[in-house]
Amino acid sequence: MVGANRAQNPPRGECRQCWYHAYAGRQAHAHLAPREDCPDCVAHMVDGHPAHLIVK
């Protein structure tokens, strides 16, 4: 499964959480209702990416 592998291996300088949420497909947001915003994604859009999640 190419998508799952890509979701788990972000390139340097990218946020692990954002990369996973972008490439894991519906799996990352399966717990959300239709049209419900993901709290983790919104937090990253508002507050930025925590340094410990950025791939070095």
Image (cartoon, grey):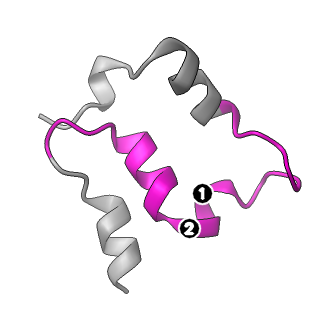
Residue type for callout 1: Ala
At a point 61% along the width and 33% down the height, the residue shown is: 40
The residue lying toward the viewer, choosing from 56 and 35, is: 35
Which residue lies most toward the bottom here?
Answer: 1
Can you tell which mark lies on residue 50?
Answer: none
| Classed neighbour count for the residue bearing mark 2: other residues with Cα under 10 Å, few (<14), some (14–19), many (≥20) | few
- Horizontal relation, residue 34 to residue 15: left or right: right
Residue that label 2 marks? 25
Task: Give the residue at x 25% y 52%.
Answer: 10
Q: Which of the 4 image quadrants contains residue 37?
A: top right
Residue 14 placed where, x, y %?
Answer: 26, 39
Q: Position of residue 2 (x, y in %)?
A: 33, 82
Q: Is residue 44 left or right of residue 30?
A: left
- Against 42, residue 27 (above or below) is below
Residue 24 against residue 33 in the figure, above or below: below
52 left or right, relative to 45: left
Q: Where residue 6 appears, x then y in whole percent?
A: 30, 68
Work out which quarter of the rendered image holds the C terminus and state it. Answer: top left
Helix, strand or loop at label 1? It is helix
Magenta range is 12-39
Q: Position of residue 27 (x, y in %)?
A: 61, 66
Per the image, the residue denoted by label 1 is 28
Distance (Cα) linking label 2 and label 1: 6 Å
Quarter of the view holding residue 46? top right
| Cβ atoms under marks 2 and 1 closer than 8 Å | yes
- Looking at the image, which residue sits at the far top? 47
Say which residue appears at 88% left-offset and 53% top-offset: 33
